[in-house]
Image (cartoon, rainbow, N blue to C red):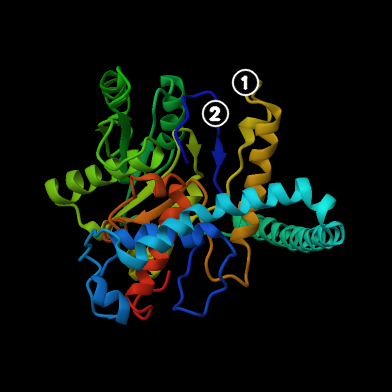
């Protein structure tokens, strides 16, 4: 999730939309990830209720009553332990692999056997999910969408740091070809104050593409804000807050009419992606309260770019396949978006936008976890994602 300085160009051709559905406690299958525990205790600092409300699960607490608090007592101790747990497990595993066969031969062999069995089972399951996702994607691409008139605006947030103008122009040229671009696309260039020529770059793009979209504006994220770390997550937090103030507060746009699109500076969604979201929003307007729209992606440029190391290129393809498999899991009620996704402005505001601290560096997974835990604190009855 961290912004890179243009060395690795990732072009993503986005596929069909996937809806994430949040269920009440105990009904979903939890992923066995320490990251869930870590993010949970990170989010305790910004929970939607006070201490008493969280303890008893009061359902009528407003989602707008975000009260940043500091951890104390047992919460602080658990938080400190949990955030160190992944590294601790890694160190123990490495040490055990190094000296285990010498000291505990049979234990080490059985541990290795159990690992290989579990790895093979998970690999087969992931392969099945990948095949299922590929077939669903092929079927979805051929599906005819109903002809509809757009009622929503898409706020395209493009975070960037020291990106070449050619890269940003290529991205904007792609979206400018869409039928709804001039009427429904609100482009927000998320510039970084640490880049000396960011204002000049943004002004150039605004003048070149101002007549190709409904509007093109830019935000400049100051460097070194308290509690923040540099990256896509903090850039998008600032850009998202700017978009809310600029369009909803200053220009009186209906907050329920805006859908914010999180992406990288070289992400290329298909036009069909936005058409599908529009159709879903018109069919079920309650999505504004609780839905994240995501899609499979493919880093097709990395496979052929000579500037990208072969290891990185192949790893990116594996990550793309893993993401597609995750979206295709029918036995999981909670699924992570990857890199690029859309969130209704109302839901994004209620979640207090992206987090700018170190816990938000993996902004896609962290945003999904924020949405999940926010709904749990409200009791899980009124909003399903």
Q: Position of residue 11 (x, y in %)?
A: 55, 34
User: Mark 2 packing: few (<14 Cα in 10 Å), some, or many (20+)?
Assistant: many
Q: Residue at x 27, y 60 (%)?
A: 346
Q: Is residue 159 above or below residue 297?
A: above
Contact, mark 2 vs mark 1 (Cβ under 8 Å): yes
Real-space CA distance between mark 2 and mark 1, rounded to the nearest whole angstrom? 9 Å
Q: Secondary structure at mark 1?
A: loop
Q: Residue at x 42, y 27 (%)?
A: 168
Left or right, 306 with respect to 285, comes to right
Residue 301 as seen in the image, left or right of residue 239: right
Residue 98's tag is none
Q: Is residue 206 above or below residue 327?
A: above
Residue 19 x/y as whole percent: 49, 63
The answer, for residue 276, to whether it is visible in the render is: no
Sooner in the amino-acid sequence: mark 2 or mark 1: 2
As rendered, which of 252 and 304 lies closer to the eye? 304
Quadrant of the snapshot with the C terminus: bottom left
Q: Is residue 103 visible?
A: yes
Relative vertical location of residue 1 with respect to residue 37 in this rendering, above or below: above
Q: Name the residue that disc number 1 marks.
A: 307
Question: Can you tell which quarter of the image residue 166 is in?
Answer: top left
Residue at (40% x, 39% y) in the render: 232
Q: Secondary structure at mark 2?
A: loop
Residue 100 spot, x, y in % from top left: 78, 52
Mark 2, residue position = 9
């Amino acid at each position: 999730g961290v912004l890179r300085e243009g060395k690795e160009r990732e072009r993503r051709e986005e596929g069909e939309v996937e809806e994430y559905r949040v269920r009440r406690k105990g009904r979903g299958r939890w992923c066995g990830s320490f990251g869930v525990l870590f993010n949970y205790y990170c989010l305790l600092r910004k929970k939607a209720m006070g201490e008493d409300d969280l303890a008893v699960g009061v359902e009528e607490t407003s989602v707008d009553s975000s009260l940043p608090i500091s951890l104390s007592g047992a919460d602080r101790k658990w938080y400190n332990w949990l955030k160190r747990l992944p590294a601790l497990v890694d160190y123990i595993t490495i040490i055990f692999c190094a000296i285990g066969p010498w000291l505990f031969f049979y234990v080490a062999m059985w541990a290795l056997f159990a690992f290989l069995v579990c790895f093979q089972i998970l690999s087969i399951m992931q392969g099945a999910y990948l095949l299922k996702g590929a077939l669903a994607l092929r079927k979805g691409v051929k599906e005819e969408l109903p002809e509809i008139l757009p009622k929503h605006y898409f706020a395209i947030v493009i975070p960037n740091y020291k990106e070449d103008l050619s890269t940003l122009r290529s991205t904007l040229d792609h979206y400018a070809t869409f039928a709804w671009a001039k009427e429904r696309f609100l482009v927000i260039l998320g510039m970084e104050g640490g880049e000396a020529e960011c204002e000049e770059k943004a002004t150039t793009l605004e003048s070149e593409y101002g007549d190709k979209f409904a509007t093109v504006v830019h935000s400049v994220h100051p460097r070194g804000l308290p509690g923040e770390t540099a990256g896509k997550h903090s850039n998008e937090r600032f850009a998202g807050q700017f978009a809310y103030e600029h369009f909803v507060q200053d220009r009186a746009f209906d907050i329920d009419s805006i859908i914010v699109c999180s992406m990288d500076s070289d992400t290329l969604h298909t036009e069909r992606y936005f058409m599908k979201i529009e159709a879903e929003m018109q069919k079920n307007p309650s999505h504004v309260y609780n839905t994240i729209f995501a899609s499979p992606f493919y880093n097709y440029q990395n496979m052929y770019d000579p500037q990208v190391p072969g290891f990185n290129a192949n790893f990116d393809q594996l990550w793309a396949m893993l993401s597609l498999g995750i979206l295709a899991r029918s036995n999981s009620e909670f699924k992570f978006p990857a890199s690029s996704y859309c969130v209704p402005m109302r839901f994004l505001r209620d979640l207090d936008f992206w987090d700018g601290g170190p816990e938000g560096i993996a902004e896609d997974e962290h945003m999904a976890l924020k949405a999940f835990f926010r709904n749990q604190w409200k009791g899980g009855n009124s909003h399903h994602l």
